[in-house]
Image (tube, grey):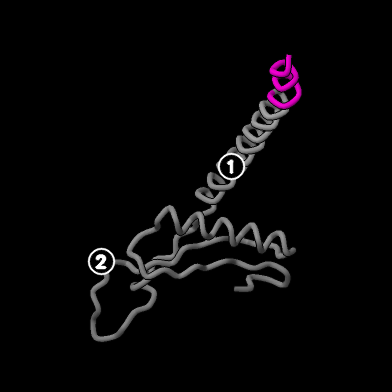
Amino acid sequence: MPTGADTWAIYEVKSSGSVKEVQVQNLAYQKHALEGAGLRLSGCYLVHVFVGYERGRELSLQDLFRIVPVEDELLRAEQLRSLTGLRLVQQNATLNLRFCARRHILSPLRKM
């Protein structure tokens, strides 16, 4: 949804009654992809059904849905993804070193 001349906000609408971690992770990937495509984002929100809503004579969409800003959760998700990516790089480097050590150090010793 455009929020200005060159900024957008993400509103992800869910049928659940609360914000779930998997929804935050999904929104984190969407945010990453949109920013990578050059869009400037002014905010990210999850919209879910308010389970305590009781309909009167008229339907009130403002009361039926809750709009929850999830910037803090997205920041934690991005930090976790960065940390996880770093761990994967470190693990891969360790595996490569072990492979090289076996191939270049241990193999010639076995031939003796």
Q: Position of residue 104 (x, y in %)?
A: 76, 24
* Magenta segment, prevailing SS (helix, strand or loop): helix
Dot 1 or dot 2: first in sequence order is 2
Q: In the image as oriented, which residue stretches furthest toward the front? A: 112
Q: Does residue 78 belong to the magenta stretch?
A: no
User: What is the quadrant of residue 111 in the picture?
Assistant: top right
Q: Position of residue 26 (x, y in %)?
A: 52, 59
User: What amino acid type should be assigned to the residue bearing mark 2?
Assistant: Gly
Pointer 1: what residue? 79
Q: What kind of element bears circle 1?
A: helix
Mark 1 vs mark 2, CA separation in Å: 34 Å
Q: At 45% from the left edge and 60% from the top edge, which residue is drawn?
A: 68
Dividing the picture into quadrants, the one containing residue 30 is bottom right
Q: In which quadrant is the C terminus drawn?
A: top right
Q: Position of residue 32 (x, y in %)?
A: 64, 57
Q: Is residue 111 above or below residue 10?
A: above
Q: Which of these two is toward me, 57 or 1?
A: 1
Q: Check disc 1 and give the amino acid type.
A: Gln
- In front: mark 1 or mark 2? 1
Question: In front: 12, or 94?
Answer: 94
The residue stretch that appears in magenta: 102-112
